[in-house]
Image (spheres, rainbow, N blue to C red):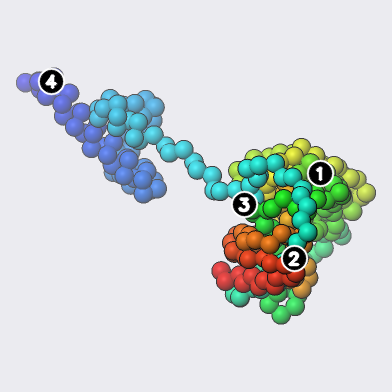
Amino acid sequence: MSANPVFLRARRGARLQVACSRIRLAMRLKLPVRTASRWAAAAAAAALLASVSACGDAEGRAETASAAAPVEQLPPAIIQPLAYPYAPGSSALSGRMTGIVRLAVVPPEDTIVRPASQQDVCGTQFRDETVRVVQADRLAGALVWVSNPPAGKPMPTSRRFEITAARCRLTPRVVATVAGGTLNVKSSDRVLHRIRVLNSRSGDTHAVLLHNDRGQVIPVHEPLETAGLLELRGDVHQWMRAWVAVFDHPYFTVTGRDGSFELDSLPPGRYELRTWHERFGVRVDSVEVGEGETVVEVSITE
């Protein structure tokens, strides 16, 4: 005797609901779909062919909406444009902030790069030096800036900055620039370099620079129009990396070989001092600046 059609539809619906629940659990746990049982895998294939609407039909439209993939959230921007246009001002009283950035943790080991080709230019082996501690525990190449700048110091008059590809490496590793400037990317190598200019937050490509001979210079304008952090990365030589910080105010610098920095022409007040390094992220300090010199020590602890 054949089964009642109404009963069969109800039983199939129940099985589909169980399978959909298992599929969602597997997806939530980031497990392969096959771990949700053979039946779930079979139902998954059917559900995928139906663009997941089969599960929605079985369990309701609201459940289908909740099963949709979440929108990816980007991390906060390391350097953000000011909420107001920067305007230079004048003050009879101004101070300056001098300081040291110290590394209070054991430096992570750098990668040893062994180029598989073009060794006459790139070398046979070298250390990809991301953490430079030249003097004791002082960290070189850290970006330091005031995130709530006052009206005061004029904007830098120099608007041209440079990074060089030499021996299949980009130097300097970190460059601080001003919005509206130009970055000249130069090659000193007789090899092909394909360098990508990326938004460090989203990973979007702003430009692709193609060098094919020594002495070639490619100017970069548009990515420097807005404050933010850019990453330069090699496509051919993937270890080639550099960072370009773009600011829309003048209160920024990069620590020297001894880990020191100075920010001048600061009217007395409390400022948010930010320090960034590619291996350690951002550190935020609150600093009270008075007349004359204010000495600061920034300690990187993680």
> In the image, is 5 to the left or to the right of 175?
left
Query: Which quadrant is the C terminus positioned in?
Result: bottom right
Q: Earlier in the sequence, mark 1 or mark 2?
A: 2
Picture coordinates of residue 117 (x, y %)? Answer: 79, 55
Instruction: Look at mark 2 in the image and give the residue it sits on.
Output: 96
Few, some or many residues within 10 Å of mark 2 (<14, 14–19, 20+): some
Could you give the CA–CA distance between mark 3 and mark 4, rounded to whole angstroms? 60 Å
Q: In the image shown, does 9 or 101 lie closer to the viewer?
A: 101
Q: Earlier in the sequence, mark 3 or mark 4?
A: 4
Q: Is residue 67 above or below residue 241?
A: above
Q: Earlier in the sequence, mark 1 or mark 3?
A: 3
Could you give the CA–CA distance between mark 1 and mark 3, rounded to whole angstroms? 19 Å
Q: Earlier in the sequence, mark 2 or mark 3?
A: 3
Instruction: Look at mark 1 in the image and give the residue it sits on.
Output: 181
Picture coordinates of residue 130 (x, y %)? Answer: 70, 64
Q: Secondary structure at mark 2?
A: strand
Instruction: Look at mark 4 in the image and give the residue it sits on.
Output: 6
Instruction: Look at mark 3 in the image and give the residue it sits on.
Output: 78
Displayed quadrant of residue 40:
top left
Could you give the CA–CA distance between mark 2 and mark 3, rounded to whole angstroms? 24 Å
Displayed quadrant of residue 272:
bottom right
> In the image, is 198 to the left or to the right of 63?
right
Picture coordinates of residue 93 (x, y %)? Answer: 75, 61
Q: Nearer the viewer, mark 2 or mark 3?
A: 2
What's under tag 4, amino acid-wise?
A: Val
